[in-house]
Amino acid sequence: MKTKKRSWIRSAIKEAENCDFQMPWARGARREAFISRRRAQALARTPRASA
């Protein structure tokens, strides 16, 4: 038996399909490059043990 979708569900699905906002985990190469630069700077600033 197929249930009838409520109008608010249909409108929510329609809005979700029209949404063009990029989520942080979906930004790809640009975000990955930013993270790698930040990690490299953090590694360069770590104190080294004296010999």
Image: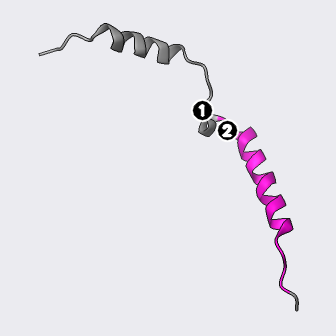
Crowding at dot 2, Cα within 10 Å, few <14 / some 14-19 / many 20+, comes out as: few
Q: At x 88% / y 92%, what residue is drawn?
A: 51
- Is residue 40 located in the magenta-colored stretch of the structure? yes
Percent from the top left, x then y, of residue 44?
86, 66
Q: Residue at position x 80%, y 62% from top?
A: 42
Q: Mark 2 = which residue?
A: 28
Question: What residue occupies the far top of the structure in this picture?
Answer: 7
- Residue at 87% x, 88% y is 50
Q: Relative to 9, is 50 above or below?
A: below
Q: Which residues are magenta?
A: 27-49
Task: Calculate the distance from the C-alpha at mark 2 to the C-alpha at mark 1.
Answer: 10 Å
Residue 27: quadrant of the picture: top right
Q: Position of residue 47 (x, y in %)?
A: 84, 76
Query: Which residue occupies the foreground of this view, 23 or 30?
Result: 23
- Up-down: is 9 above or below 31? above
In the rendered structure, which disc, 2 or 1, sits on the residue that comes first in sequence? 1
Label 1 CA crowd tier, 10 Å (few <14, some 14–19, many 20+): few
Residue placed under numbered mark 1 in the picture: 23
Q: Quadrant of the N terminus?
A: top left
Horizontal relation, residue 44 to residue 9: left or right: right
Residue 13 picture location, percent across and down: 41, 16
Dot in front, 2 or 1: 1
Indicate the secondary structure of the residue bearing disc 2: loop
Q: Is residue 2 left or right of residue 20?
A: left
Q: Residue at x 79, y 53 (%)?
A: 38
Whether pointer 2 and pointer 1 mark residues with C-beta atoms closer than 8 Å, the reply is no
Q: Amino acid at mark 2?
A: Gly
Q: Amino acid at mark 1?
A: Met
